[in-house]
Image (cartoon, rainbow, N blue to C red):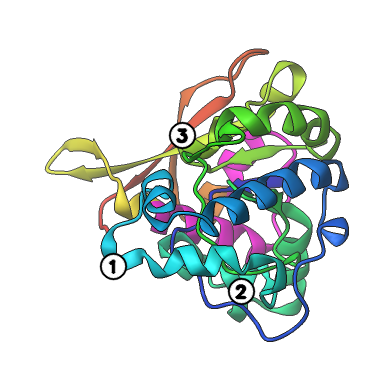
Amino acid sequence: MLVLLPPSEGKSGSGNGAPVELERLSLPGLTAARGAVLDALVGLCRGDEDTAAGVLGLSPGLRGEIAKNAGLPTAGARPAGEVYTGVLFDNLDLATLDEAAYDRAERSLLVFSGLWGAVRISDRIPSYRCSMGVKLPELGALGAYWRSAMASVLPDVADGLVLDLRSSAYAAAWKPAGEVASRTATVRVLQERDGKRTVVSHFNKATKGRIVRDLLLAGAEPKTPDALMDALMDLGHHVELAAQGTARKPWQLDVVVTEVH
């Protein structure tokens, strides 16, 4: 099973160790594209601060992110699973997984990134600020920029069930197609209250984090979207089939919650 996750805007600080080594990151087919984005981002942030803030969409209180980006080539790197924070990662809570579950997380989780394309949780990266929605002056919109590189790399690692939990901005970088789409499942989180169902936004991330954590702890490795539904229901989640997948479109599963935490 391959689980596709969005990153988080919030990130913990960079480490004190060696800086990122692009050639040692997972998915080596992305190395050249990663280098190009890193160079463009660093160049932007070493230039005019107002321009950089506008491109990155930073408020005055976040101007410090520009200096952080400017220092990325020499900043200390940490495992990506420790760098990403935020609601989804708080509920996934990688640090408290047992050894077997953490090993499964290292094998199955792939975090998409505007800067790195996609990384495993064990890949060592520095803290940065660059969402997939950014348009870098030298490269253009990152969602479009990454498509070619992703299309040449991702099908090789998506060799089983693909559980796609990315937000729309990150889904733009790679869309499963053909046979891969037919074994890909996306998840929508609905809250049921007083007989009515509504799409939840912020707590959508919390539910997705809990789903992944439950699967990892249970050692569940479903091979098909149908088997994924069964596994989640066995773990106590209310799951319904919203749309069956085709060669052009992934399966869509609805996870219904009555309480939002």
Q: Earlier in the sequence, mark 3 or mark 1?
A: 1
Q: Amino acid at mark 3?
A: Ser
C-beta proximity under 8 Å, tags 3 and 1:
no
Regarding mark 2 in the picture, which secondary structure is present there? helix
Q: CA distance from mark 2 to mark 3?
A: 24 Å
Q: What residue do we see at 50% from left, 65% from top?
A: 89
* Residue 196 image position (x, y, % from top left): 17, 36
Asked which secondary structure carries label 1, the reply is helix
**Pointer 2 residue:** 82
Q: Which residue is more in the foreground, 258 or 35?
A: 35
Dot 3 lies on which element?
Answer: helix
Q: Looking at the picture, tell me which residue is in the foreground, 90 or 32.
A: 32
In the rendered structure, which segment of residues is drawn in magenta? Answer: 205-231
Circle 2/circle 1 CB separation < 8 Å = no
The numbered dot on residue 168 is: 3
Circle 1: residue type: Gly
